[in-house]
Amino acid sequence: MNAVEQRLTKEPKRAPAAQSAAPELPAQAGGEGKRTDRWLLGRMLASLGSPPLELAIQGGARVGAHTPVARVTFDSRATMLWVLGDVPLRFGDAYSDGKLSVEGDLVTLLETVYRAGRRLGGERDPIARRVSRVLRRPHVNTLSGSRDNIHHHYDIGNSFYELWLGSTMAYTCAYYPDPAATLDEAQVAKMDHVCRKLRLRPGERVVEAGCGWGMLAMHMARRYGVRVRAFNISHEQIQWARERAQREGLSGRVEYVEDDYRNISGQYDAFVSVGMLEHVGLKNYPTLGGVVQRCLGGRGRGLIHSIGRNRPAPLQPWIERRIFPGGYPPALSEMARIFEPWDLSILDVENLRLHYAQTLRHWLALFEGARGRVRSMFDEKFVRMWRLYLAGSVAAFSTGSLQLFQVVFAPGESNDIPWTRAHAYTS
Amino acid sequence: MNAVEQRLTKEPKRAPAAQSAAPELPAQAGGEGKRTDRWLLGRMLASLGSPPLELAIQGGARVGAHTPVARVTFDSRATMLWVLGDVPLRFGDAYSDGKLSVEGDLVTLLETVYRAGRRLGGERDPIARRVSRVLRRPHVNTLSGSRDNIHHHYDIGNSFYELWLGSTMAYTCAYYPDPAATLDEAQVAKMDHVCRKLRLRPGERVVEAGCGWGMLAMHMARRYGVRVRAFNISHEQIQWARERAQREGLSGRVEYVEDDYRNISGQYDAFVSVGMLEHVGLKNYPTLGGVVQRCLGGRGRGLIHSIGRNRPAPLQPWIERRIFPGGYPPALSEMARIFEPWDLSILDVENLRLHYAQTLRHWLALFEGARGRVRSMFDEKFVRMWRLYLAGSVAAFSTGSLQLFQVVFAPGESNDIPWTRAHAYTS
């Protein structure tokens, strides 16, 4: 029994998680209604793969494990019924609106749900899956669609992200040479890991697709002596990056271009993209590969860093709707569609999912520390949405529902490739 | 101009590679026939993507580059016409039968052909490709089919392989920590590289699928303190491995099983397969993944080491017919079919193609040094076949036509996975 379980089972004000022995509290539904509610809550729990949770309606029915790792309480029968109509999407919405509360650790709760979902596996009705795919048609990533999708997430205010991303403003998986490293140390180590894998040499030209707040580009220019052209369609991020580069005297060596990766032109020694592929959309992978091929022209090296999957599956629907419109984490077999049409050779793949779980734990802790300020910048609903998103992401990576792939590649005909990977580990 | 070109262009007995100025030598075809032959040789060269070679008929027509890197001479018009009917298959057959000769370095010649073929790219008629796929239906890998296919290549005599594989009897890509390493050093380094990637711990149980002459299994038991069950369907190899293990006092810790990977049973901490996947056949990949899943049961680690491709393509037809019946080098997207159905997580992929080119150069040199003995064991045709196979393989890896993938994986739900890859580089 862990600490959360103890807290839950020792809690004096609530009856233990029993389906029949609970005293008759004032209920929204009568005896018959309560039996129905229990049946409905039971169905909801079963649809999640029966994780060891307790589900309850405030002052009403409750079902679930005898030693639940967490308890979810709906504020009313109406909320419970509404969530039941589309659990993957509406659980998040009800949580954000404060219409359901969670006792116990949110990350642990979500890890439990992810693990139970894995046991459910492919059992889900394929017709239901197809129907839900049509109903929940993801946001498309045309040139203008991408701009809308990116604006939705990244242009909500640099000062918000500054509250919890740490000093590097890197909004992608960090690399912890040691699990005890700090967030900032790990983000700098990630930048070095990327640069070493690419074997950057002074004087080389690098193009970056989707540069965020531009700190990797500055790091490459400062520490590895390369010249960088960095593309991004988030207006707010590009502004921030240009000002920072100006302040640091790097403007001559780093150029930030507010444009889509599809419009990249010129010849480069290296292509790098950290955390953009999630927004590219499967259909555009061959186009992205064509951009790479054009940039490198039969020589050079490249690296793409992206969230991924063990096998193809759509993004969690609440995340796709509310957090990352148009987002899609590919399986490695899908990432291959970038490379195969252009005879690009995959040289190295590293899966860093446990590092992303750790990064997200650090972000979540900083976010919680700043939640008062976040609330004053936005509102309580925003705080709850982002808490759920960050906690859910920790859970997705720690349970293996999401992966993080760093893929190094080179044009197929090029022999100017690293002989071994030892250079990335011996400085 | 390289050394071969100089030798060829300086050679006094032959006219330079000119299509019209060549003196009228005694020809098998008259003036009209010679023009036809030149046209036909020109077509053959074009079908190869116009590599900088000279093609000639002995005492007759010749076409090609002014400074060819090598010269191919057919012994007769009949041979040339016969080869023209199916160049990818019959070039190798004519070479093996001594009906065509090569001046210049065989590896360089074949590298030139591979590079030109890449330029040809996807231009090849898709209907012709489909027809050739039907005509050249590869050998299937059913339980009995696999036995026949493996017998064809691996049971031709251990003493033959002992002549040129070096002391480790490893018939797979070696790992050269330094390009100057010897073959034996590199083969031992490969075994260590595999064991480190798997993070073998003393007392663990390992299953090996396709163990060759069993030296990796013995290395794992001796150096890493694990117990190994190693499967192989080559009778000759299993016999050799058992005797060797007996001699080295390792019989108690290594068990060799003469059986198909599909019949592996039991629970293990690690699954390893080095150089078997090429013989498994695409259709059986999900079955192989199922075996892995069964062996590891939600925990442990695995490694599969295999020849691969940048994109799906059949094995070179002559190699599939004469050398590796049933062989198929998969693209990484195809290898994913092993892992995806079972939610196995790909943790690490390393492409070692330049190491395989180096390994093959070492094998080829040892083979050439022993060709007199090989000839006395078999015949001249066998020597030429194997020379062509080894030289062609050097060329395929050095030009990026083939890849070598080492893939580390683990059950998707397991967090008992290496935190970083540093342990493989710091001893």
Image (cartoon, coloured by chain):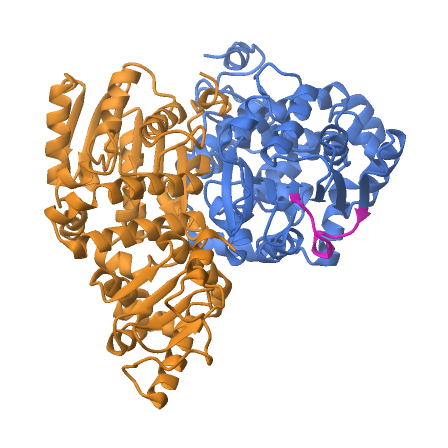
Chain colours: A blue, B orange
The boundaries of the magenta stretch are A257-271
Count of numbered circles in the view: 0
Q: Position of residue A380 (x, y in %)?
A: 77, 29
Q: Residue furthest bottom?
A: B32
The answer to whether residue A267 is magenta is: yes
Q: Position of residue B239 (x, y in %)?
A: 10, 33
Left or right of A25 in this view: B124:
left
Q: Nearer the viewer, residue A297 or B364?
A: B364
Please say if A415 is above or below A195.
below
Residue B376 seen: yes
Give x and y (percent) for residue A268: 69, 48
Q: Is residue A61 visible?
A: no
Residue depicted at x 58% and y 57%: A286
The answer to which of A421 and B298 lies nearer the viewer is A421
Say if A412 sits above or below B103 in the image. above
In the image: residue A333, left or right of residue B367? right
Residue at 51% from the left image edge and 24% from the top image edge: B420
Q: Quadrant of residue B86?
A: bottom left
Q: Is residue B117 left or right of residue A134?
A: left
Residue A125 spot, x, y in % from top left: 42, 50
Name the image quarter holding the C terminus of chain A: top right
For the N terminus of chain A, the quadrant is top left
Q: Nearer the viewer, residue A395 or A27?
A: A395
Q: Is residue B193 above or below residue A241?
A: above
Question: Which residue occupies the foreground of this view, A158 or A262?
Answer: A262
Q: Is residue B55 magenta?
A: no
